[in-house]
Structure formats: C-alpha cells, structure tokens
Image (tube, helix red, strand yellow):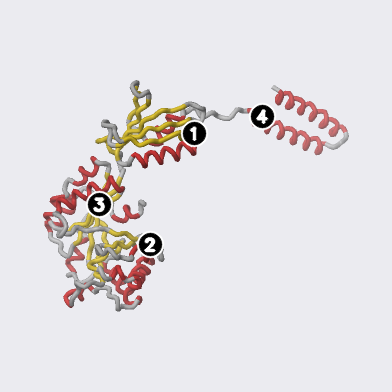
C-alpha cells in the first residue's frame, strides 16, 4: 500500500512538472520527465509482485532425485521406508542424497549403514533436517530383485582370424551391439569382404605387438616391435586404418613385452590420438605401463581381461563378467569368435536386462565414464 501511494504521488508530481515545462515552451523536457517517471513506476510495480513460490515439498524432491521405487511408513520404527532400485550401492545412494540435500538448503543429521535388514539387499538409516525445519526420519533400502534400467554397461567383443557363413549368420542373429577384433594384416582378401556382411558391429584393430611368443610365422601380421622407429610404427597404423577405415580403436595382440615399453607405446598412442582412436591393453601383463603412458596423450586407454582357458571355462568367464557389471558399473567380455561361444551368449541380453545392465559397444562404454 505504501509503494502504491508513492507511485500515485510520482504521477501527480510528473503531471505538474510536465505542465509547467509545456507552458514554458519546453515540450521536449516535459516528455523526458514523463518517460522517466513512468519507467520508475514500472520498476516499483515489478518489485511489488510477489515471487513465485516453490510448492514442491523437499521430501518429494529428494524422492525424485533418488528415483525411489516405493515409499511406506513403518509404525514399528516410526520411519518412512524408501525402496531404491538395485544397480547402485547404498553408499552411492547416500552420497547422491547428501549432495542434493546440501545443495537445496537441507542438513544431514546422520547417515548410518545397516547390516541386519533382512528385507533388502542393502539399507541405511538417514536423519535429515529440511530447509523449513521439519525432521525427516528415513530408511533407505535397496531392492533385492528390482534393478534400475541402464544402471551398468557391458561390452562384448570377439577375437577372430576366421569367418564362416555359419558364424556370420549367428552374429547377425544377436540382438545387441558387439565389437570384432580384427588383424589388419596377414588375412586373405575375402576375410575383409566378409566383414561387410556383419551387422551391428564395431571394428577394432587387433595389432600384433612385441612378445616372446612371436616368431617368423607372425611376420605376416606386421607386429609392432621395440626396435621399430616411431615413423615405422605410425606408418604401420596408417596402413592398418586404410585396410579397416571404420575401426574405432586399437587392441593389443600378444604384446606382453610391448606394454612394458614406454617408448613403443608412445609411438602407438601418438597416431592413435591423431585418428581419434582409443587403446585397449589385453596383454594380461601385470607390469604394464599403459595407464602412465596414456596420461601423456589426449586418448582413452583401458585394460581389459579376455577369456583365458588356463583360468576358467567359457561358461564361468561369461558368468563372471555378467556379475561384474552391476558391481563395478562396467564390464568388458572378450571371447574367441566361434559358433560354440556364440551359442553360449545368445540369451545374454535378457540376463543383462534383468540386472539393469545394458550391452553397448566398446566406444560407448569407454566414453561413458
């Protein structure tokens, strides 16, 4: 009401001043006075309009943030029970909640992980003070069997030096994307033509590298050796990309000596960076210096563990990689490309979906983190 009186007074004053200026043959000055007062009045009117209030309760905002499955009230514990989808650990959920609460003006009083809740996979007690002063007494519990969609990612890749019509047909029957690790040298021309018959694939350069396992028979694969110059290695990679121009990354073949040799790796990563390719170490060498060398370049480098017949059966390896995805967030499965192995993963997309794991190609997985 006070501001409204001020506005009325301003208009009265403006009228008087404008009238005086007009009768003094100064019409321009009168107009300037009127425009100035009208602008001031407009600003004051805007200031008197109340700001739009946020009517969504704080608890509801937090529920939306965490994407809870259900909410109930326990008379026994006098707490609200929020059930969360499996796919993240309770610790990750607690950190997510804490970040949201602090950002939105609330206060975390306490968060305590519980180890004796038989009704859930993982759970925690949470005490929160909302911005309006209300106390929230909550129990977070992660569901045993309801998984969130796309909670984790898994890639499936195949190593191959041979393609048959039966294998191609089986690959084309798969209902998920996959990668094929392909030697860019030493293969018959028909091999590369047959690659074009495969759908839903991503191609990776499977480059032979320095190893004690190499002998003269491997020379047709043009392995990258320690005694090669950087120029020779770059030319090798350029030639490989010409053979398989759609290749998105480089994976080691053999290479347990190469991944311990920083200078050789630098010579590989430099042209890979130029071509926007990633690098994957499959050597199983514990003393690899790939992670350290990768820091010198703007390139994604990963270490993955292909199937090793010395350690497990194919079935056990597949089961292990499937379980690994929801636990760590990502998983890479690499198998020899055979009809038998393809038969063993025909239903893997269904199994993965039930645990909230999406199957994506390697490039998508590597760029997701």
Distance from Cα at disc 4 to Cα at disc 3:
60 Å
Distance from Cα at disc 3 to Cα at disc 1:
43 Å
Q: Which residue is mark 4?
A: 45
Q: Which residue is mark 3?
A: 177
Q: Nearer the viewer, residue 369 or 163?
A: 369
* Front position among marks 1 and 2: 1
The number of discs equals 4
Q: Secondary structure at mark 4?
A: helix
Q: Which residue is mark 1?
A: 106
Q: In the rendering, at what x and y percent does residue 6 appear? A: 74, 26
Q: Secondary structure at mark 3?
A: loop
Quadrant where the N terminus is found in the figure:
top right
Answer yes or no: do the residues labelled 1 and 4 have beta carbons within 8 Å? no
Q: Residue at x 44, y 32 (%)?
A: 61
Mark closer to the chain start, 4 or 3: 4
Q: Which mark is residue 299?
A: 2
Mark closer to the chain start, 3 or 2: 3
Q: In the rendering, at what x and y percent does residue 4 appear? A: 70, 24
Distance from Cα at disc 1 to Cα at disc 2:
40 Å
Answer yes or no: do the residues labelled 3 and 2 have beta carbons within 8 Å? no
């Amino acid at each position: 009401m006070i501001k409204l009186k001020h506005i009325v007074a301003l208009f009265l004053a403006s009228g008087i001043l404008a009238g005086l200026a007009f009768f003094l043959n100064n019409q321009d000055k009168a107009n300037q006075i009127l425009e100035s007062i009208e602008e001031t009045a407009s600003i004051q009117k805007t200031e008197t309009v109340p700001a739009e209030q946020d009517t969504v309760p704080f608890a509801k905002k937090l529920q939306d943030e965490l994407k809870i499955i259900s909410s109930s009230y326990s008379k026994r514990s006098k707490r609200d029970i929020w059930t969360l989808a499996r796919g993240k650990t309770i610790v990750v959920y607690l950190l997510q909640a804490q970040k949201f609460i602090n950002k939105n003006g609330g206060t975390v009083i306490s968060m305590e992980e519980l180890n004796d809740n038989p009704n859930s996979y993982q759970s925690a007690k949470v005490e929160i003070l909302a911005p309006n002063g209300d106390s929230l007494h909550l129990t977070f519990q992660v569901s045993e069997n309801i998984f969130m969609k796309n909670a984790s990612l898994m890639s499936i890749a195949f190593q191959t030096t041979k393609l048959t019509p039966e294998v191609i047909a089986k690959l084309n029957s798969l209902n998920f994307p996959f990668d094929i690790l392909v030697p860019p040298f030493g293969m018959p021309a028909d091999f590369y033509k047959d690659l074009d018959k495969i759908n839903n694939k991503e191609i990776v350069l499977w480059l032979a590298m320095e190893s004690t396992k190499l002998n003269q028979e491997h020379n047709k694969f043009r392995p990258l050796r320690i005694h090669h110059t950087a120029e020779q290695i770059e030319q090798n990679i350029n030639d490989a990309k010409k053979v398989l121009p759609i290749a998105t990354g480089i994976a080691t073949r053999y290479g347990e000596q190469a991944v311990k040799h920083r200078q050789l790796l630098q010579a590989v990563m430099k042209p890979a960076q130029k071509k926007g390719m990633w690098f994957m170490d499959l050597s199983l060498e514990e003393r690899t210096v790939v992670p350290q060398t990768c820091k010198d370049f703007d390139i994604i480098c990963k270490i993955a563990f292909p199937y090793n017949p010395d350690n497990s059966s194919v079935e056990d390896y597949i089961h292990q990689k499937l379980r690994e995805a929801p636990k760590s967030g990502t998983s890479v499965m690499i198998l020899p490309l055979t009809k038998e192995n393809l038969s063993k993963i025909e239903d893997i997309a269904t199994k993965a979906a039930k645990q909230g794991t999406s199957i994506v190609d390697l490039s998508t997985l590597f760029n997701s983190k």
